Amino acid sequence: MERVLTVGLDGSPESLAAAHWAAEEAQRRKLTLRLLHAWPLLAPEPARVPAELDQNYWAKRLVHNAQTELQAHYPGLTVVGNLVADDAQDALIRAASESEMLVLGSRGLTPVESYFLGDISMIVVGRAERPVVLVRAEGRTEKPTTPEPGATGDVVVALKLHAPYDELLEFAFTTAAARSLPLRAVHGRSSPLHAYTPWGVDHTVTQEIVQGVQKDLNQALRPWREKFPGVKVADTIRLESPARAVVGAAEGAELLVVGRRKHHPDVGPHLGPVAQAAVHHARCPVAVVPHD
C-alpha cells in the first residue's frame, strides 16, 4: 500500500501554508503527498463539458493550482489531487486513517476566537487515528515572546511522565531525525503546596522535585537516544502548569509535539489542557499524536 501524507485544502492561506509544510515533510520522509479537497456538493464527474459548465470547476482549480505550485517548488515530490464528494470532517478523519499523518491549516487565534473555537480542525484532531499537524499561515501579527536561549529551531515534545509516551516520542524523534534538528523534551509540573512558605518558595523542596523529574526524564529518553543516535537531545523542566510550560518552551521551535489519549468512539472528541493550550496559543506548527 502506498504511503501517503495528506493535507486538507479549502482555499484559505492557512491551508496553502499547511500544504507547503506537508510537502517539505513528505519529501523528507519519501512519502506521496495527497491534496484533499472535500465538498458535499461536488457533482458527478461530467463527460466532456466546457469549463464554464463544469460544476466542479472551482474545486478542480483549487487543487490544480496548489499541485502546480508545490511541484514547482518540490520537483522530486509525487503530488496527487483528490476531490471527495463528502462532508469535510468525515473525509479528513477517514483520510487520516489512511495516511502517515494529516496536515491542516490553523487560524491564528485572538482570545475571543480561542473561546469560540469549534471548527472542523478541532473535531478532526480529537478523532483522528493518526497524528494531525496544524500549521498557521505566515505573516502573523502576534508579537512573539523571547525564546529560551538555544531553543530556536528545534523539535519540542511535551512529555507527561508515568503515562504512555512511546508513540509520542517515536513521532518526535522521527521528525527531528528527518529534519536534522535537535529535540527537546519539556516537562511542566506545578510546585506542591508544601513548597510554599510565608517568605517564598522552599528551594530544597523544588530541588528534590527537579532531581526526581530529571531521573524519570533520563529513563524515558534513554532508549530513544540509543535508537536515534544522530539526534541531539536536551530537556527542559519547568515548575509551573504543564500547559504554560509547554507553550512557553515552544517559542522559536520548528514543531511542537503533544499527545492526546485515544477515546472510545461513543465519547466525543476531547483534548487535554496541554494539547488545548498548544493548538490555541503555540505559534509554531503543532503535531497532536494520539496514544493509548
Image: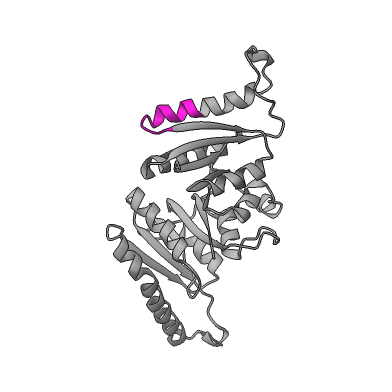
* Colour basis: one colour
Total labels drawn? 0
Q: In the rendered view of the protein, which quadrant contains the N terminus?
A: top left
Where is residue 61, by image quadrant?
A: top right
Q: Is residue 116 left or right of residue 149?
A: right
The answer to whether 56 is drawn above or below residue 242 in the figure is: above
Which residue is painted at 60% across and 65% down in the image?
A: 273
Q: Is residue 110 visible?
A: no
Task: Give how far across and how far down residue 199 sits, in percent.
Answer: 53, 86
Q: Outermost residue toward the left? A: 230
The answer to whether 290 is drawn above or below residue 16 in the figure is: below
Q: In the rendered view of the protein, which quadrant contains the C terminus?
A: bottom right
Q: Nearer the viewer, residue 100 or 288?
A: 100
Q: Nearer the viewer, residue 154 or 220?
A: 220
Which residue is painted at 60% across and 34% down in the image?
A: 37
Q: Is residue 152 magenta?
A: no
Which residue is painted at 29% across and 65% down in the image?
A: 226
Task: Give how far across and how far down residue 253 sits, in percent.
Answer: 43, 53
Task: Give how far across and how far down residue 104 sits, in percent.
Answer: 56, 44
Q: Outermost residue toward the front? A: 1
User: What range of the chain is rendered magenta?
Assistant: 67-78
Q: Is residue 231 left or right of residue 280?
A: left
Task: Give how far across and how far down residue 122 sits, in percent.
Answer: 64, 51
Q: Is residue 159 left or right of residue 54?
A: left
Q: Is residue 237 visible?
A: yes
Where is residue 127, by image quadrant?
A: bottom right
Q: Nearer the viewer, residue 275 or 77?
A: 77
